[in-house]
Image: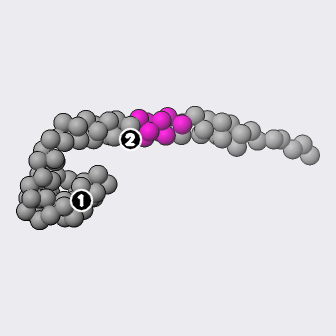
Amino acid sequence: MKYFRCNHAGTSQSSAEPASAPKTDRADELLRLKRSRNRANTIRNWSKVEDYLMRVEKANGFARSWVLRERLEQGQVSLDELMRG
């Protein structure tokens, strides 16, 4: 009785690797683009952030302003959310 090797497993592995690589590259590219947009928005809106934080500092003191600055930098809250609340 002859035994035949099945190369399906080897073929599917080699074809699966290139198929998963573009997904990872695409996800990395999307993440890079998102970070780039966020950076651009932060730079554009930084004067608004500074103005808001200066008003908070005058009204509530430096400690409160610093806490809000840290939350903004860490992305825990947006400027719009702070200004609404």
Q: Position of residue 9 (x, y in %)?
A: 70, 43
User: How far, Cα to Cα, is label 1 from label 2?
Assistant: 28 Å
Which of the 4 image quadrants contains residue 47? top left
Tell me: residue 80, above or below residue 41.
below
Tell me: residue 84, above or below residue 33.
below
- Tell me, yes or no, whether the highlighted magenta stretch contains residue 5: no
Tell me: residue 16, above or below residue 52.
above
Q: Mark 1 or 2 closer to N-term?
A: 2
Residue 62: tell me if it is visible: yes
The residue depicted at 34 percent of the width and 40 percent of the height is 35
- Tell me, yes or no, whether the highlighted magenta stretch contains residue 28: yes
- The local secondary structure at tag 2 comes to helix
Give the labeled residue for mark 1. 66
**In this image, 48 relative to 16: left or right?**
left
The residue depicted at 16 percent of the width and 47 percent of the height is 50
Between 21 and 9, which is closer to the camera in this rendering?
Answer: 21
The residue depicted at 32 percent of the width and 40 percent of the height is 34
Q: Amino acid at mark 2?
A: Leu
Between 75 and 64, which is closer to the camera in this rendering?
Answer: 64
Q: Which colour scheme appears in the figure?
A: one colour
Give the residues drawn in magenta, as a range.
21-29
Tell me: residue 46, above or below residue 63.
above
The residue depicted at 13 percent of the width and 59 percent of the height is 57
Give the labeled residue for mark 2. 31
Which numbered disc covers residue 11? none
**In this image, 71 relative to 57: left or right?**
right
Q: Position of residue 40 (x, y in %)?
A: 25, 35
- The local secondary structure at tag 1 comes to helix
